[in-house]
Image (spheres, helix red, strand yellow):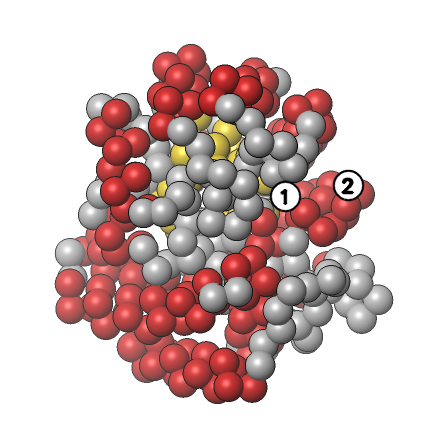
Amino acid sequence: MSSLTEQPLHGVLPVLQTPFTDDRRIDVTTLHREIDWAFEVGADGVVVAMVSEILRLGDSGRRELARLVCEAVGRRGFTVISVGAEGTATAIDYARHAEGLGASAVMAIPPVATSLGGDATCEYFAAIARSIAIPLVVQDASSYVGAAIDLSVYTRLLDEFGPERILFKPEASPLGPNLSKLRDATGGTARIFEGSGGINLVDCYRRGIAGTMPGTDLLDGIVALWRALEAGDDERVYGLSLPVCALVALQLQAGLDGFLAIEKYLLHKRGLFPNTHQIEPVGWTLDAETQAEVDRLFARLQAAL
């Protein structure tokens, strides 16, 4: 019987928040505690991505975080490392580094400082995929940065590399209908991951996703919701999804910084993080009234569990 990590990427794969010490170094002890908790709760693996603050960590910080996460996970589950960069050569370097660390897959967003057409976007992702033997998750990320990736880019990549090597994380709005377009355009062969934090999880699950990449802060709720969806238990599905959706709606108000601030607040509230430090500058911080609403909704989610 094959191990989990030898199976195709699937299931609940939370994006890790990066914990920091008071002098803004990666807090290794807390990172290990976060990863251990993720697997205890039922995650199928973990992800290093945008909400892990990779765009603010710098080159050495990104490499250190990737190494620490791959070492901590071992063979307990999947490890997905984001490798997107402004230059193709840099993205390839990050991808090869992640593969060398034993990552299960890499994920990449397009360059954000340059507006690329379909051909250049396709070639950027293809160059990354050609440089490694592990799967590449093509992330749209237009909910945070850049422009939506054209459907033709997805289909061309799938035609060249196949569904075992190229996976997708579309984020352009409207998410559900766009996901269905990708599914239908590829005859159902595309392996698609939902990344809305959970606010669109129920809708996307019904459209045939292979997995979800939520934040770590609501992971117990997302795992329970995923299992309820698999069991077809609609009563439990909606009992869990409504507080999740309300919490993610608060995070979405402030974009990436909204997810960072509220997710770190909840991880601190759970006792997993000793602080809520972020890499500055940040565009939004948690105010008292939003915090009070987060507390009320979090209590409802815990009661639903």
Q: Quadrant of residue 256?
A: bottom right
> Where residue 7 sits: x, y (%)?
40, 33
Q: Distance between the Cα atoms at labels 1 and 2?
A: 17 Å
> Where residue 103 sits: x, y (%)?
58, 36
Residue at (42% x, 49% y) in the render:
195
Image vertical order of residue 158 relative to residue 15, above or below: above
**What type is the residue that disc 2 sits on?**
Asp
> Where residue 130 sits: x, y (%)?
56, 16
Image vertical order of residue 112 relative to residue 213, above or below: above
- Which circle, 1 or 2, is nearer the viewer? 2
Quarter of the picture holding the C terminus: bottom left
> Where residue 173 sits: x, y (%)?
36, 47
Please tell me the numbered disc located at residue 59.
2
Residue at (67% x, 33% y) in the render:
86
Q: Quadrant of residue 26?
A: bottom right
Please tell me the numbered disc located at residue 70.
1
Image vertical order of residue 52 relative to residue 301, above or below: above
**What type is the residue that disc 1 sits on?**
Cys
Residue at (59% x, 62% y) in the render:
257
10 Å neighbourhood of mark 1: few (<14), some, or many (≥20)? many
Residue 283 visible to an observer of this rendering: yes
Residue at (42% x, 57% y) in the render:
197
Query: Mark 1 falls on what kind of element?
Result: helix
